[in-house]
Image (cartoon, helix red, strand yellow):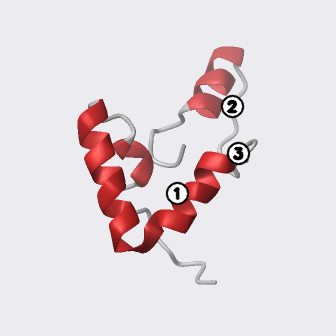
């Protein structure tokens, strides 16, 4: 695995913040171009693990980071 992979230019998590119909169109497109199995794996997951390197101390910041962080990988 390449340790030099940068941030995604268009992270998929941002699509979920779109208006519902737009997200449905985007999701359908992602499935059509070969991502159906990955999306099904995400949909069927019982939990998610975030392996961030950020250290937060305040309870408010911990909750914010846990739920949505910077919006790019949740």
* Crowd band around label 2 with a 10 angstrom C-alpha radius: few (<14), some (14–19), many (20+): few
Horizontal side, residue 71 vs residue 48: left or right? left
- How far apart are the two marked residues, 1 and 3, measured between alpha carbons? 14 Å
Q: Earlier in the sequence, mark 1 or mark 3?
A: 1
Which one is in front in this view, the residue at disc 1 or the one at disc 2? Answer: 1
Q: Are marks 1 and 3 in contact (CB under 8 Å)?
A: no
Q: Quadrant of the C terminus?
A: top right
**Where 28 sits versus 14, above or below?**
below
Task: State the mark number for residue 48.
Answer: 3
Q: Position of residue 42 (x, y in %)?
A: 60, 52
Is 41 placed left or right of 23 in the picture? right
x, y (%) of residue 45? 70, 48
Q: Which residue is mark 1?
A: 39
Q: Which numbered marker is on residue 63?
A: none
- Separation of residues labelled 1 and 2 (CA atoms): 30 Å
The reply to whether residue 18 is visible in this rendering is yes
SS at mark 3? loop
Earlier along the polypeptide chain: callout 2 or callout 3? 3
Q: Residue at x 70, y 45 (%)?
A: 48
53 or 24: nearer the viewer: 24
Residue picked out by circle 2 = 56
Q: Where the N terminus falls, by quadrant? A: bottom right
């Amino acid at each position: 695995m390449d340790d030099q992979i940068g941030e995604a230019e268009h992270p998929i998590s941002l699509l979920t913040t779109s208006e519902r119909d737009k997200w449905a169109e985007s999701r359908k497109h992602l499935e059509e171009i070969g991502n159906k199995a990955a999306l099904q794996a995400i949909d069927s997951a019982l939990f998610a693990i975030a392996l961030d390197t950020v250290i937060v101390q305040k309870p408010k910041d911990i909750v914010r980071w846990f739920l949505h962080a910077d919006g790019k990988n949740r």
